Amino acid sequence: MSRNISRKAEAIVMRSPPIRKCFLYVFFALVSITNVMWIVSSYWLNRRLRHNAFNVTYRENVTSAMSVTIRITVLAEKPVCSAPDKLVGVMKMNMAEMIKTYHDLNASVSTQSTRSGGFAFEPDSCKPKLSVAIIIPFRDREDHLKTLLGHLHPILLRQNLRFQVFVVEQSGNGTFNKGRLMNTGFLYAKNEAKTHFDCYIFHDVDMLPEDDRNLYSCETATNRVYHLSCSVSKFNYKPLCCGMTVGGVLSFSENQYIKVNGFPNDYWGWGGEDDDMNSRIKLQGLRVGRPALGLCRYYMIEHERDHFNPYTENVVNDRVAVANQKAKISGLNNLKTNTTSVTNRPLYTHLYVDVGPVGE
């Protein structure tokens, strides 16, 4: 095909007058040079795409008074993160420093024009192996939240994770329902967030990890869920003390949480939902894994329970006693809450949730 075109072009040139011959020779020469330059530039661009990040700026004059600039940024593929190598180990519990870190991080992220709200954080230098959603049930504990986030954000970055924090706040002054808040947070993170999450970690707002070697992760292809907070300051760091089962900080994969039908929805006030979850885990043939005792130490921030979060021991015990019977009928499959607002803040996504009236 190309030979035929060349012969036709040569025939046109030979039949043309001398002056036209000159113009035609110049024209075909320019076409050939352009083709060679295009091949060379394509090869060079492909090499840059494979190996480096670069910017291309294209300017097109629209009128004499206006121009349009299109800026295209192509980023090189980041390597997969290796095992974290910048972990501190045992950390001092300095509350004032944690709150200062919160404000510093909050101000830093707020001034980054390249970051839009609602996206997950991740390390700059590598591509994380796991994406983690941190779900925090919450109401009227602003200082505790700032302390936790100022402490937890740096830990999760050191652990080479992609993560997003979801603070799920109960609206109004009704009795607190932690299970409904955690279920609502899970469904929002799963269905509405811009990131796909491998792990969902349910985290009390007053629990501070004391060792960053306690990895915030999950096992996506096994039957083991992780209870990360198995040694707590309030109980003198005795493992599984005082009736604690899987309370505090608990990690699931998506499939594991769906399999247990989430947390129960019918525990109003303090206590019971964690013991119920422990029954659900066993009922579905899952096992509870825990870090080494020295790694799973947590400091619990001291506070008084508010009167909207009462503990009624007899009611809680009665419900836990029939936990297995309720596992398939109370949880993700019958959740009735209303998320009235979603706000993307610099360090977390805030959900404001109406959990409904007591007893429904």
Image (spheres, rainbow, N blue to C red):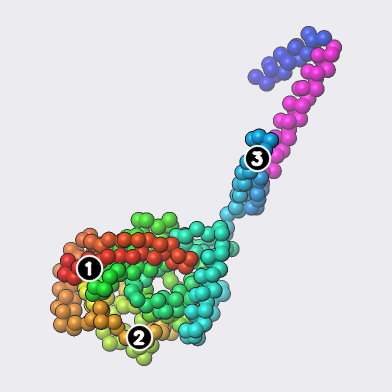
List the residue tagged with mark 2: 303
Magenta-drawn stretch, dominant element (helix, strand or loop): helix
Between disc 3 and disc 2, the foreground one is: 3
Residue of label 1? 265
Q: Residues within 10 Å of mark 2 (few under 14, many from 20)?
A: few
Circle 1: residue type: Asn
Give x and y (percent) for residue 162. 48, 64
Range of residues picked out in magenta: 18-47
In the rendered image, residue 35 lying in the magenta stretch gets the answer: yes
Residue at image mark 3: 67
Residue at the extreme bottom of the image, as rendered: 236
SS of the residue at dot 2?
loop
User: Going from the N terminus, do you reach mark 3 or mark 1 first?
Assistant: 3
Residue 325, horizontal then vertical, whole percent: 15, 69
- Which residue corresponds to the image point at 53% horizontal and 59% vertical from the top-left? 115
Q: Secondary structure at mark 3?
A: strand
Q: Residue at x 45, y 65 (%)?
A: 345
Q: Nearer the viewer, residue 320 or 114?
A: 114
Is residue 74 among the parts visible in the rendering? yes
Disc 3 crowd rating (10 Å Cα; few below 14, some 14-19, many 20+) is few
Q: Which mark identifies residue 158?
A: none
